[in-house]
Image (cartoon, rainbow, N blue to C red):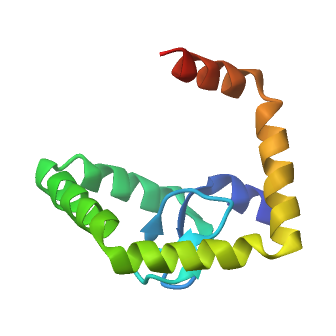
Amino acid sequence: MEQNKQNKKMTSCVCAKCQKPWRKSNSPAVCPVCNQVSFAIAVPEESVAAMKKQWQDPEYRAKMRAARKKQGQDLGYQTRLSAAMKKLWKDPEYQAKMSAARKERWQDPEYRAKVSAAHSK
């Protein structure tokens, strides 16, 4: 019971390996901080509030956008990400998990409407 209350307060994510803030994700990807393939894990609401406040700062936003853009243009990063994803998709368990998640996502009428509207544009 106590664990359920604690889980409800967890709303955002951090890298499972380096513990740095990361986007919410159910699938592994290359962490933008430690460059390791990792799952994101949940973090407390207080941390989420602090991160949101930090992102309200225009200087911080500009700095992070520039860093993300630079990272996306880095051929080494792209190569590591590609290799990591190819390795993951060779795993039958991972394929089944991702397939089930996609099928579940498409059952949501809101998601279908959102995708349909995006494609219509």
Q: Residue at x 37, y 81 (%)?
A: 76
- The quarter of the picture where residue 37 lies is bottom right
Q: Is residue 90 left or right of residue 39?
A: right
Looking at the picture, how far across and down is residue 15, in whole percent? 53, 74
Q: Residue at x 52, y 55 (%)?
A: 45
**Residue 85 image offset from top left, x and y in percent:** 62, 71
Residue drawn at x 47%, y 64% is: 22
Q: Give above or below for 15 relative to 64.
A: below
Residue that appears at 17% across and 50% down: 57
Q: Is residue 53 left or right of residue 48?
A: left
* Residue 83 falls left or right of residue 101: left
Residue 13 position within the rendered picture, expressed as x and y whole percent measured from the top left: 55, 63
**The N terminus is located in which quarter?**
bottom right
Vertical arrangement, residue 113 with respect to residue 86, above or below: above
- Eyeballing the image, is 116 above or below 51? above
Q: Nearer the viewer, residue 67 or 75?
A: 75
